[in-house]
Image: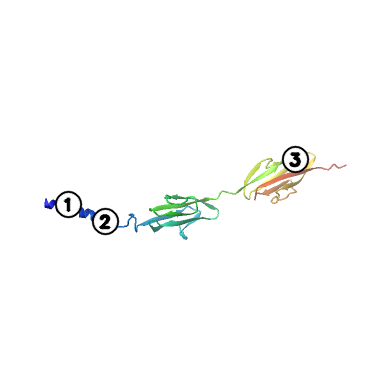
Amino acid sequence: MHVKRISIFLTMIALIAGMAACGGSGDDGNGGESLTLTIDSTAGGVVTVNNVTIPGKSILTYDAGTVVSLNATPDSGYQFVRWTGDVYTVDNVRASETIITMNGDYSIMADFEVLPPVQYSLNIIGPAHGSVTTPGEGRFFIYEEGTVVNLVAKPDSGYEFARWTGDVDTIADVNAASTTITMNGDYYICAHFREIPVVC
């Protein structure tokens, strides 16, 4: 019986010692724990972590609970979309500048995409005594920035083309019935016609 009590006593001491060893790393169980943050990005930009630019995919180490600043900078012709991956503690996944709190081992990626082309509208106001046959009349025509659009005006019988008016800054020749306009903005234009003088 005495041997049995000693055995139980020694077992309890061993259990207590084991528990102390398991909990000895900190009050919250994470004290002094090192966590990894794997950073990567798609093509079209770079990531800065705590003001240091990250060259491609990198694995960084932080203490548990550390707040890390993230900044995604797109290349020319690209835009930042969102942070993806282990984004549970990312403050705002759609903000290019945000923070992440290190409560675990995380792998996140900055997603970039090609900027959509800038588009402008061309509105042809229907003229009197003629028509604009190319590209047409009375509605908005949508073109990508920099597109060169053909303009063709056709007079009615007894009339001749006079000039283009409105937003004519990029029209090649405002006095020509057949010309072009370069789409660098939203434009309203109109073709004007005049009566052909009667020669006696």
Q: Amino acid at mark 1?
A: Ile
> Which residue in the rendered view is the most extreme toward the top?
157
Q: Is residue 35 above or below residue 142?
A: below
Disc 1 crowd rating (10 Å Cα; few below 14, some 14-19, many 20+) is few
Residue 78 numbered mark, or none:
none
- Tell me where residue 144 appears, x and y as whole percent: 61, 48
- Name the element at disc 3: strand
Q: Earlier in the sequence, mark 1 or mark 2?
A: 1
- Tell me where residue 68 appears, x and y as whole percent: 43, 57
Identified at 73% across, 44% down, the residue is 191
Q: Quadrant of the C terminus?
A: top right
Residue 130 numbered mark, or none:
3
Identified at 13% across, 51% down, the residue is 4
Which residue is tagged 2?
Answer: 20
Looking at the image, residue 172 sits to the left or right of residue 80; the answer is: right
Q: Please tell me which residue lies in front, 5 or 100.
A: 5
- Tell me where residue 85 appears, x and y as whole percent: 43, 50
Which residue is tagged 1?
Answer: 8
Q: Amino acid at mark 2?
A: Ala
Q: Earlier in the sequence, mark 1 or mark 3?
A: 1
Tell me how far mark 1 sits from mark 2, CA to CA.
18 Å
Identified at 53% across, 52% down, the residue is 78
- Tell me where residue 195 appears, x and y as whole percent: 80, 42
Q: Please tell me which residue lies in front, 91 or 143.
A: 91
- Name the element at disc 2: helix
Tell me how far mark 3 sits from mark 2, CA to CA.
95 Å
- Name the element at disc 1: helix
